[in-house]
Image (cartoon, rainbow, N blue to C red):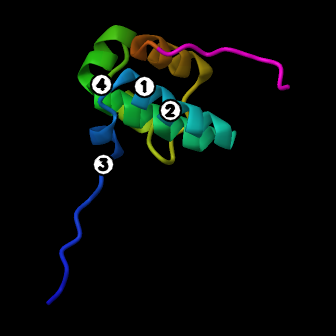
Amino acid sequence: MAEKLMIYDQAEDLTSDAAIATFMAEAFATEDPFSIAHALGVVARAKGMAQIAKQTGLSREQLYRSFSGSGNPTLKTTIAVMKALGLELTAKVPV
């Protein structure tokens, strides 16, 4: 008997601020801009893309395109989405 595989959506597991913070920290640790952009897109979907679009003044389509696996959002878009998600972009000196 063949097994039926289901599509896993990471956004479904991001139900708390702590889960979102951990998810984003892991994305930033990769230092890969595409991984970071994709992770922001996942978090935006978890929070509600329509709400993020409303808060940022960007269209849902633009957000989906910018934060897809092949997207390349501008820094302005990235900061606007992070602000709407309640995330901060900070710098620190490595120890």
Q: Secondary structure at mark 3?
A: loop
Numbered tag placed on residue 47 in the rendering: 4
Q: Which sits earlier in the primary sequence, circle 1 or circle 4? A: 1
Does 14 appear in magenta? no
Residue occupied by mark 1: 18
- Cα distance between the residues tagged 1 and 4: 13 Å
- Cα distance between the residues tagged 4 and 3: 13 Å
Q: Residue 94 in the image: state x and y as whole percent.
A: 83, 25
Q: Which sits earlier in the primary sequence, circle 3 or circle 2? A: 3
Q: Secondary structure at mark 2?
A: helix
Alpha-carbon neighbours of circle 3 within 10 Å: few (<14), some, or many (≥20)? few
Q: Secondary structure at mark 4?
A: helix
Residue type indicated by callout 2: Thr
Residue type indicated by callout 3: Asp
Residue at 33 percent across and 25 percent down: it is 16
Alpha-carbon neighbours of circle 1 within 10 Å: few (<14), some, or many (≥20)? few
Decide: is 61 above or below 69. Answer: above
